[in-house]
Amino acid sequence: MGIPFASGCVKGYKRNTQGGKTMEDALIIELFWQRKEEAIGQTADKYGSRCLSVARNILRDDGEAEECVNDAYLKAWLSIPPARPERLSAFLVTVVRRLALDKWRRRNAEKREGDRQALLLSELADCLPDRGSDGNIDLWVERTELTEALDRFLREQKQELRRVFVLRYVYAFSIGEIAEREDVSENAVTVRLSRMRKALRKRLEKEGIAL
């Protein structure tokens, strides 16, 4: 079977507006394994808004964000099988984020200084392993050792701290957007993020992960 959708899936897919429940992840993944076209529709219905939010926060362009989400659906279709992700939402967010970052890099190859993503990477530079001379974030994101250490670190944090960290460094929200969402001051957000970065650095050093 060929690829079950054309470009424009985000705009063209008719979302469930009847208040029905979304399908469980395991069933959606099984549809992918069975090469059923419904897998794409169910994925868009359940996670389309979340994926669009991630892409928009990075690219600040609706058209490019929709293109990234469509590309993520394509990558999911081509990857599952053989992949069988334990958490479909995490799989999709990771794919969309990488696609959006790649697109952002290409678009801003000559004007990165001062940009939101350059700022995010610079904030994390002192508490994550060296990304290498080419600044390729995927080189360290894909390291299982680091990923597991980050997961353990975040699970041990208070919910409000974990939420702020994820909003900033996974969903690329601005300090102001996080402050509004969490109903706190921008200074409070900045302080929480600073403390989290310092704590993360100490944790990684303690676990022997080279910085």
Image: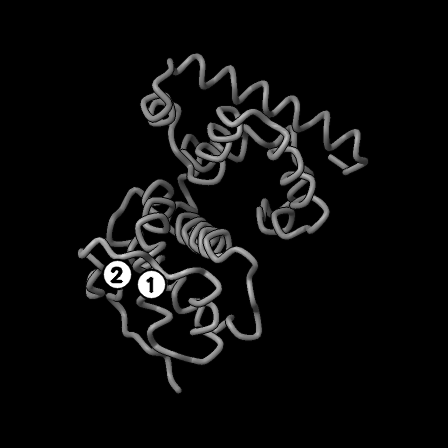
Q: Earlier in the sequence, mark 2 or mark 1?
A: 2
- Looking at the picture, does residue 66 appear above or below residue 131? below
- Residue 38 higher or lower than 207, as above or below: below
Left or right of residue 92, residue 6 in this image = left
Circle 1: element type: helix
Residue at the limit of the structure toward the bottom, as seen here? 1
Q: Residues within 10 Å of mark 1 (few under 14, many from 20)?
A: many
Q: Which residue is mark 1?
A: 70
Q: Residue at x 34, y 64 (%)?
A: 42
Where's the C terminus, which quadrant? top right
Taking the image as shown, residue 15 lies to the left or right of residue 204, namely left
Q: How much space separates mark 2 and mark 1, taking CA atoms?
A: 7 Å
Amino acid type, mark 2:
Val
- Residue 96 against residue 2 in the figure, above or below: above
Contact between labelled residues 1 and 2, with CB atoms less than 8 Å apart: yes
Colouring rule applied to residues: one colour
| Residue 59, x across and y down, in percent | 34, 45
Q: Give the quarter of the figure containing the N terminus.
A: bottom left
Q: Position of residue 195 (x, y in %)?
A: 59, 18
Disc 2 marks which residue? 10
* SS at circle 2: helix
Kind of residue at disc 1: Asn
Mark seen at residue 145: none
